[in-house]
Image (spheres, helix red, strand yellow):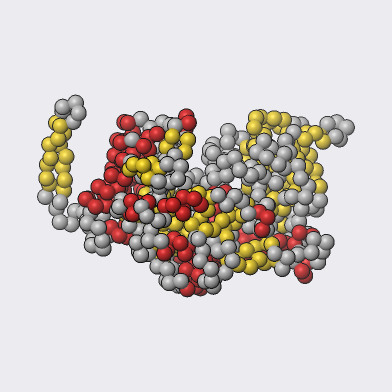
Amino acid sequence: MLVECFLLSIAGAAQTIQVDITPGHSTSRFVPNETLGAGIDRIPAEAIDKDLVQPNLGKALASGWQPVTYRQNTELAVEAWHWNPQGTWSDPSGRGYFTGSATPTEFIRYSYGYSLPRRGFTRNDGTDNAGFSRLTDGDLRSYWKSNPYLTQRFTGESDALHPQWVVVDLAQIQQVDSIRIAWAEPYATHYLAQYWTGDDPIRVPTRGVWQTFPHGAVTNGKGGSETVRLTASPTPGRFLRVLMTESSNTCGSHASSDPKSADPKSADPRNCVGYAITELYIGTTTADGEFHDILRHTPDQEQTTTYCSSVDPWHEPSDLGSTKQAQMGFDLFFTSGVTRGLPAMVPVALLYDTPDNAAAEIAYLKKRNYPISYVEMGEEPDGQFELPEDYGALYIQWATALHRIDPALKLGGPSFTGENKDIEVWPDANGKVSWLGRFIDYLKQHGRMDDLAFFSFEHYPYDPCRIPWGSLYDEPELVRHIMQVWREDGVPANVPMFITESNLSSAASETSLDLFAGLWLADYIGSFLNAGGNGVYFFHYLPLQMEHGCNDSPGTFGMFTVDAGYNIQQPLSQFFASQLINLEWVQPGAGEHR
């Protein structure tokens, strides 16, 4: 039946709200201790120490959130995750590809990321002002290398189906007619040199096309330092791409534990597949044959900006980054009480890791008898500019490895960045631009849709610094619309949708401190469930210190303000909204709600 409620607005005008409680008319069914949860990310090690003991832990639990999702953060920083500090290196010299120990020994309190030395990003959605690309760093001893797990040796498919690429941003339109590539090994024997006809191929990938230079198709690359005259007269362009489709599959001196050895028999095969570039040079060639480079080569973020398709997860102990920030150790996570003893969603690193390390992680958790609800595969591949077919190829390899440990594991992803519209990429051969649609197609083509037990994405609906009060009215349609987009992209009706990370915006500001944030949270949770969502996680569960966000305004993703010692000072509006949702609107526990 319909129940009509008459309310008076602030302006005094009467409004009618209809509530339909007719049996069979429910839009969603859910169980609170499976559906309404919160997330924990990489945070300062000091915060881990203070937040997982009383009184902070008790106050966080008092918000009523139930299951917890462990957020994977090292992928955002282009780092390899040592989820267990104890483990083995692939190379006897103590470097290479790291696999954490699956045998429980020492209690794991913290875990860290190791910056990848073969990186090809100047910056991306996660690195901000940290690190630099090896493509324009001016160091002929360093190099970018693509991910070996995207080659035929591991995918079972032609390398041409997973082309690897590097993009150079010249910052402004410049005249170009030549490119010089200082190849490492392996090098590309077949590649295209191209320029972009639109504004920005990274941020707006559907407004323009990649145009191959008249002499930009190389079909007999020899490696070494290779200069190609791309066109008879200079062509204006800002963004240039090298698209690689066939590798030499050769091993250089870097492939062995002995830096003086180039013996292929001693090489790790992962070092001998894919593509490696020491340095890129772009510019013009004068009539006398002199090449003039226009790129800036520096080992910092002032270098000419580059992007890449993937990064080899090879690294060594000296690549350990700052330990002031840490991923919470799994033993601490599961024994501290923050999970309430409920099954938790855990991640595996995928973009910058190996299937062996991911499988060892799950084996470790199983040996500890820690309850797992779901396993999320990687973190924000769209923010790392990973193409959907490449993510799909990694997803299948990881799924195979994880299901050898436990065939019943529920795997999912891709944990999209918080977008309000479909995520689009450069069109494929059929002109399709939907990232998710193409990922779903890839799984179907390989008969692996059963490996997608859930679909996950993040929800940060508002642009930082532009959150007027009137935008509160937008939330119900924003979350409903994006869920409809995902279904139209091909997510099957029987695959549940989880928002595994969510708050107002991807950047903290003073808006998160006032009443607006609490009102939004309550409306958002109800709107998500009403739209048929299956699981939602508030971010961030544990108290965090203030940070300076947009326009230098203070804000926090947590539900409390804390002092310099992480002592809670006062709850914020989202804490009270959380209690309203979890303790008043629903009955906590395992009972079904409609």
Q: Which of 546 and 237 is in front in this view?
A: 546
Q: In this view, does 345 lie above or below 383?
A: below
Q: Residue at x 11, y 50 (%)?
A: 1
Task: Measuring from the top left, give residue 93's x and y in whole percent.
Answer: 73, 65
Q: Is residue 292 above or below residue 181?
A: above
Q: Is residue 158 above or below residue 525?
A: below
Q: Residue at x 57, y 69 (%)?
A: 101
Task: Measuring from the top left, give residue 72's x and y in whole percent.
Answer: 49, 55
Q: Residue at x 61, y 43 (%)?
A: 130
In the image, 543: left or right of 87? left
Number of on-image labels: 0
In the image, 59: left or right of 247? left
Task: Measuring from the top left, give residue 590's x and y in whole percent.
Answer: 26, 63
Q: Can I make out residue 124 in this image? A: no
Displayed quadrant of residue 507: top left
Task: Measuring from the top left, give residue 409's x and y in whole percent.
Answer: 43, 68
